[in-house]
Amino acid sequence: MPALANKTYFNYGGQGPLPQASLAAINAAWTTIQELGPFTSDVWPFVARTTDQLRQRLANWFGVPPTRVAFSENVTTACLVPLWGLPWQPGDQLLISDAEHPGVVAGIRELARREQLELSMLPVLQLRGSAEVAAVGVLEALDAALTPRTRLVVLSHLLWNTGQLMPIAAVAERLQAHPCQPWLLVDAAQSLGAIPVAEAAAAADIYACTGHKWCCGPEGLGAIALSERLLAESSPTLIGWRSLSNETDAGSAFHRDARRFEVATSCLPLFAGLDTSLQLLEAEGDAQSRLQRIRARSLQLWHGLQQIDGAQTLLEQPPPAGLVSFVLGSPVQGPMPAPLAADWVRQLGAQSIWLRSLADPICLRACTHLTTTAAEVDQLLAALQRALPSA
């Protein structure tokens, strides 16, 4: 990974570095397209083969048939495009967790405004214990928040701010027993490439992912796993030639499968790049074994932070994946304000150590991946230890 040659990188939850092999695959795809001709009869089999190969690979990761996989540009688009096509009625309740990303929250709020829906909160941000204890808390909060008018639950698989794991399959099961059987929308931005996703993706109605974070693929390409129920009930929203069963006929019916939520031209070389990144991850072992290696470094970081005076992890128990959020401050100063959190990012960046600050809650976030070494975690801990007394 060229980006790792001159820095210590802990920002996989923001954007993963692109492997050299994936960069080469992108360049090779560009070359092939130009050699065949970007709009010739010769190029279409290459386009179809490249697209179908990635769709099948993602379907394998999701544990669903390829007919339930659609491509998007990013997680937010993947969440909202099928969501807006569902048959809403004024007064329907949308239940959204208090730990969702602002991009998704903004889209849900606008949907509620336009369709005259009720927006309610599902409290999960305060669940800071073990994943097992958190799972119980989520289901208890869900039972307390559900009403006869609940039609949608929005919940991330791995919370982007605290790093807590949400019991998506158990939530889906609980919703199936509800009289209205609310749809389940899952933001999986921090999940694909980081933790096993098949059980959750197969259980959710909308499981929205991106390739540029933990998958270490190129930015600008994401995917959605959609339930059969959603495919039967949701109408296309953004519509283009890829939505149609016959792309040359504007009067053609829409695809019956997930492709109805694809719009128009995508950058094909990105497909080759993401497919290569996923193959590289597969070569490192199955999803569970990869998670064990990721957690080895996040556990090292979490335990190391417990030994630093003035450092406090958001999770009270070791993290379930590679995302570690923490706050810094002296006993006199108390928890750090947002400007100080941003200053920490700048201080560490000056040492070529890169993590990020978050605003809600105010904290620092460091992500460990398969490429993270024990020495790099020690380097971050030592830098924090040296700088903390003067913070």
Image (cartoon, rainbow, N blue to C red):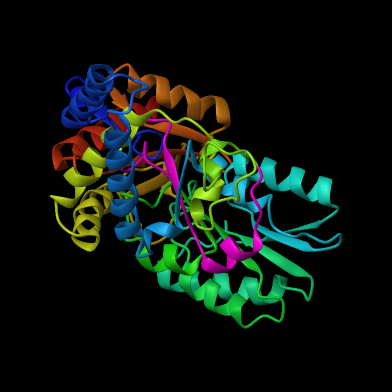
Q: In this view, does 157 lie above or below 12?
A: below
Residue numbers of the magenta segment: 210-237
Q: In which quarter of the image is the C terminus?
A: top left
Residue 142 picture location, percent across and down: 64, 72
Identity of the residue drawn at 35% across and 30% down: 268
Q: Residue 249 vs residue 299: left or right?
A: right
For residue 389, above or below residue 63: above
Q: Can residue 45 be seen by looking at this rendering?
A: yes
Left-right relation of 16 to 177? left
Counting the numbered discs, the total is: 0
Left or right: 239 in relation to 356: right
**Percent position of residue 374, x then y:** 15, 42
Specify whether residue 340 is painted magenta. no
Horizontal relation, residue 88 to residue 225: left or right: right
Is residue 391 in sight in this rendering? no
Q: On the image, which quarter does residue 355 sit in? A: top left
Tell me the quadrant of the picture where the N terminus can be found. top left
Residue 218 covered by magenta stretch: yes
Front-lying residue, 380 or 22:
22
Name above or below for residue 221 compared with residue 267.
Answer: below
Q: Residue at the spot x=27%, y=19% of the render?
A: 351
Which percent across, then down, holds residue 51? 33, 41
Residue at (43% x, 56% y) in the render? 315
In this view, the residue in front, 5 or 276, is 276
Nearer to me, 309 or 121: 121
Pick whichever, 174 or 357, lies toward us: 174
* Percent position of residue 56, x then y: 31, 53
Query: Residue at coordinates 51% horizontally, 26% vertically from top-left?
Result: 340
